[in-house]
Amino acid sequence: MGHTRLGVLPKTRLWREVVRLLQDDAAAPVIAARTRDAAQKSLERAARTVLDHG
């Protein structure tokens, strides 16, 4: 299995929390849930940007 590099994570509160959880060696379900929440917000923000400029 390889790695996919996507660039730099956004510096939002939610993504900073994901990084903190990784650093703290939090449980995988907790990291997964926070990652899902952060990604959802990022995708919503991106969609609004596209709709506003599209």
Image: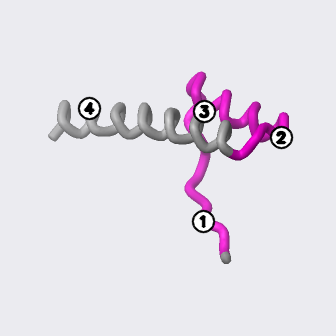
Distance between the Cα atoms at labels 1 and 3? 18 Å
Residue range highlighted in magenta = 2-28
Question: Which is more N-terminal, label 1 or label 2?
Answer: 1
Residue hosting label 1: 4
Residue at mark 4 to residue at mark 1: CA–CA distance: 26 Å
The three-letter code of the residue at mark 1 reads Thr
The disc, 1 or 3, on the residue closer to the chain's N-terminal end is: 1
Residue 48 belongs to magenta span: no
Disc number for residue 15? 3
Q: Secondary structure at mark 4?
A: helix
Judging by the rendered image, the residue that carries numbered circle 2 is 25
Image location of residue 54, percent across then percent down: 15, 41
- First in residue order: circle 4 vs circle 2: 2
Asked whether the beta carbons under mark 1 and mark 3 sit within 8 Å of each other, the answer is: no
Dividing the picture into quarters, in which one does residue 51 lie? top left
Local crowd at mark 3 within 10 Å, few (<14), some, or many (≥20)? some
Q: Which residue is mark 4?
A: 48
Mark 2 or 3: the one toward you: 2
The residue at 56%/26% (across/down) is: 12
Q: Most extreme residue toward the bottom, as rendered?
A: 1
